[in-house]
Amino acid sequence: MSLSALLARRLLFTVGKGGVGRTTVTLALALEAARRGKRVLVVELEGARGLEHALGGLRRAADPASGLERISYLAVDGRAALEEYLAMVIPVRRLLSTIFESAIYQYFVAAAPGLKELMTVGKIWFEANRSESGAEDAPEIVLVDAPATGHSLQYLRMPAAALEAFPVGLVHREAERVLGLLRDPLATAVVVVSTAEEMPANETLEIFSGLGEIGLSIAALVLNQVHSAPCDPSVLERLGRAVSDEERRSDDLLFAEAVRRAEEEAGWARLNARQVERLREATGTTTTVFPYLFREEFGATEVLALAGILRSEGGGDPS
């Protein structure tokens, strides 16, 4: 799928194992969508507000990226989403306050299995559908930086579970509407993020299986932090022979260390290449490879560089 086709969706989820770079990919997609003139809403569901912090870093950069003013941020909490929903259907403020303060309500929110996850996905559905209302400030695309694999699938499974658990009534109708958006491949897609190592790759294949069972469209696979060989293997072999302990002189130590680091990088490159090929064959999905960036700190410059890779590998600028 081209990047233009991907960004034509109303709702995109970035999903993957913890620590593989979901937030970075979410921001790179958001920057590219905003650069194309779209009003973008980035959503974070839980955790340490890494997306909010990273977006703040982009805004504080000496040379802010084009389109940043079109990106807004929202942290969605299931309990707050439930109370926002109840405020819409129960307009009497005094009654609403009584409900929120009641012990029964507190117990219900804490104990009801899946309630907060269902309300969280419902809030995302609401934001993704605001553009249909014609509101001028409504986002044209919503990008969700989903939590790590297991919890992401828990969120995304909840509307189908609610649909089965409540055969009729309000919850059934709400779940049906949310599920309709999630399963519409022209409106919603998932971008799976992974690193090209064995354990993340195994978990990535589990994600593909889980999303398939839910019925969601997987649009792309982004493989992050992929190492590349620093030189031809035959050259590295000759350099390695040249720095044997017997031949090394004191003034060769820096050269010897450089060769060892090159051998280490070549080893990572071989390992990554095997997993990239494995995932491409197993998933058959459009794959974008992000290089490993050697930086002391990861900031706006790096996110912009990765957004540029998305653009170039995704078919360039829209015609």
Image (cartoon, grey):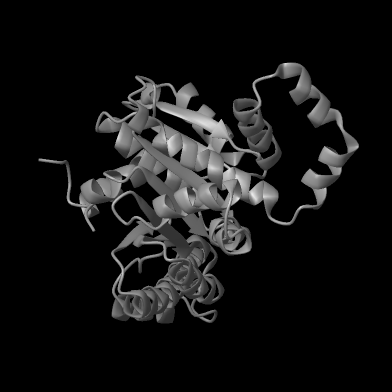
- Taking depth in this image into account, of 277 and 105 the one nearest to the observer is 105
Give the residue at x 52% y 69%: 249
In the figure, is residue 148 to the left or right of 189?
right
Where is residue 208? Give x, y as percent: 45, 70
The answer, for residue 53, to whether it is visible in the render is: yes
- Taking depth in this image into account, of 46 and 27 the one nearest to the observer is 46
- Taking depth in this image into account, of 279 and 190 the one nearest to the observer is 190
87, above or below 269, in the image:
above
142, above or below 92, in the image:
below
Instruction: Report the number of discs.
Output: 0
181, above or below 76, in the image:
below
Where is residue 272? Give x, y as percent: 42, 72
The answer, for residue 298, to whether it is visible in the render is: no
Give the residue at x 22% y 46%: 4
Give the residue at x 35% y 42%: 10
Q: Residue lying farthest front?
A: 168
Quadrant where the N terminus is found in the figure: bottom left
In the figure, is residue 200 to the left or right of 301?
right
Q: Residue lying farthest left?
A: 319
Quadrant where the C terminus is found in the figure: top left
Where is residue 314? Give x, y as percent: 23, 52
Within the image, what quadrant is residue 288 found in? bottom left
Within the image, what quadrant is residue 220 found in? bottom left
Give the residue at x 54% y 43%: 122
Where is residue 123? Give x, y as percent: 55, 39
